[in-house]
Image (spheres, helix red, strand yellow):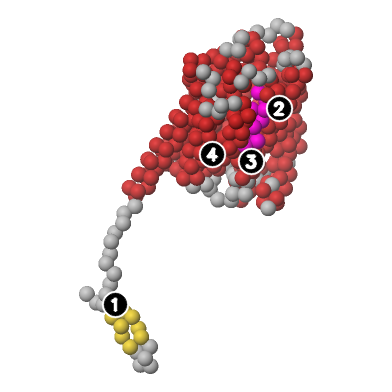
Amino acid sequence: MIGSTFGSLRVRNYRLFTIGQLIKLLGTWMLFTAQDWLVLQLSDNSASALGVVTALQFTPVLLLTLYGGQLADRFDKRRLLQLANAGSAVVATLLGVLVVSGIVNLWWVFVTAALFGAISAIETPVRQSFVSELVGKELLPNALSLSSATFNTARIVGPAVAGLIIAGLHDRTGPIFLLTAALCTAPLVALARMSPSELYRVERDALAASEARTIDGLRYVRQRPDLSLAILLVFLVSLFGFNFQLTLAVLARVEFHVDAKYFGLLTTAIAVGALAGALSSSRRRARPSVYRVLAAAILFAGFESLVGLAPNFVTAVVLLLPTGFFMIYFAQAANQRIQLGVEAAFRGRVMALYVLVFLGSTPVGSLIIGWCAERFGPRSGLWTGGLISLFAAVLLGVLQLRRVRGRIHVAWRPRPRMHVHERAGGVPVVRPAVR
């Protein structure tokens, strides 16, 4: 069982990739936690300001992600990842120096958040499609699940460590940004040590690769209902339901009046559930069905709505565990359904579209949910997002059933009448009657 759960780690290139990503993501989640706390400090606990910085961090995804997918289908993904991770280290260093020197203000945080978003917009679709080059097709579902588990392991440890450091340093966040800059160099080492000859690359015509266009990827998805439904569902749920970076910070500080380490406990709770959700699908070998994706979305939306109604901090922490489980189970099932159904020549551009709807919807969603939290209270951001996501999943499920039912034609044929004949020897033989 353990061998099948962690089978992809037997591949050296994937093992190096995972170690580098884990170290970097620990720093990234520490940075996000410190950034949110810094914004609340600089803005006098403004949910709208937190919504703005979140929107700025994810707006470049809207503008650059499809281009990132085009780059992934044209150039060496390994080299692109090296450039992107080096850029992340530079931006983290800049923010750390600004905070430690005492000259940081809210506008500087806005600028660095936008820079992080721009780098992420290019790096994420490249990284998502690069996994398919690290392992063979048989291990790809397992590798995708373990990559998600790596992400959520960092999501568990990173915010908790950041909360403890912030509390221990009397609400100072500068050292966390500098530490993140150092951790961002880990993928550079891992990528440099990989063996390019052991990558699972599909031989493609150089001219065809150089002419890979974004519009062709969009047309490809439009002609594939199995891909387009999963991407549309991810878009709607992400738009309204995946705003925990905003909603949990406001819930902790404004509703429950807790300090940084308890805010870290909220994010850790959802990440523990998410890690369990990622590992639960690591043994999957086949492509998930559309109904598995829809069911996971419905369960996630239901639990998120309950978190918004939680009467106290402890109840919220408990409810965040299944919320995190079904959040990542849904996202992972959708990711696997797309990756295992797309042709290699279009993988970079299709995954860029997936990343675009998964992350690019956050700028609009964070502004809407931030406004709800400020207007109707911090809880409303959670139950509003949950109920809208629930409605979207149910609606798409009904449309899927109607589409499938429209393709099923049941033709009734009466059974033929049977006559019994006897051969010599008394063995009965049944034949249909001739009409």
Crowd class of label 3 (few under 14; some 14 to 19; many from 20; radius 10 Å): many
Of tags 4 and 2, which is closer to the observer?
A: 2
Q: Observer-nearest residue: 69 or 20? A: 20
Q: Are marks 4 and 1 in contact (CB under 8 Å)?
A: no
**Location of residue 392 with respect to 422 vertically, above or below:** above
Q: In this orientation, which residue lies closer to the viewer: 102 or 254? A: 254
Residue beneath label 3, please? 276
Q: Which mark is residue 418?
A: 1
Q: Is residue 334 left or right of residue 269?
A: left
Residue 420 rendering spot, x and y as whole percentages: 30, 83
CA gap, disc 1 and disc 3? 57 Å
Q: Residue furthest top?
A: 103
Mark 1 vs 3, N-terminal side? 3
Separation (CA) of disc 3 from disc 2: 17 Å
First-in-chain label (4 vs 2): 2
Q: In this view of the protein, which residue sits in the foreground, 373 or 139?
A: 373
Q: Nearer the viewer, mark 2 or mark 1?
A: 2
Disc number for residue 330: 4
Indicate which disc, 3 or 2, sits on the residue closer to the N terminus: 2
**Label 4 environment density (alpha carbons within 10 Å; few <14, some 14–19, many ≥20):** many
Q: What's the magenta region?
A: 263-274
Q: Position of residue 220 (x, y in %)?
A: 45, 38
Residue type highlighted by circle 2: Ala
Asked whether disc 4 touches disc 3, contact meaning CB atoms under 8 Å apart, the reply is no
Label 4: which secondary element: helix
Circle 3 — which element? helix
Q: Do the residues under discs 2 and 1 have CB atoms within 8 angstroms?
A: no
Q: Earlier in the sequence, mark 4 or mark 3?
A: 3
Q: Residues within 10 Å of mark 1 (few under 14, many from 20)?
A: few
The residue identified by callout 2 is: 160
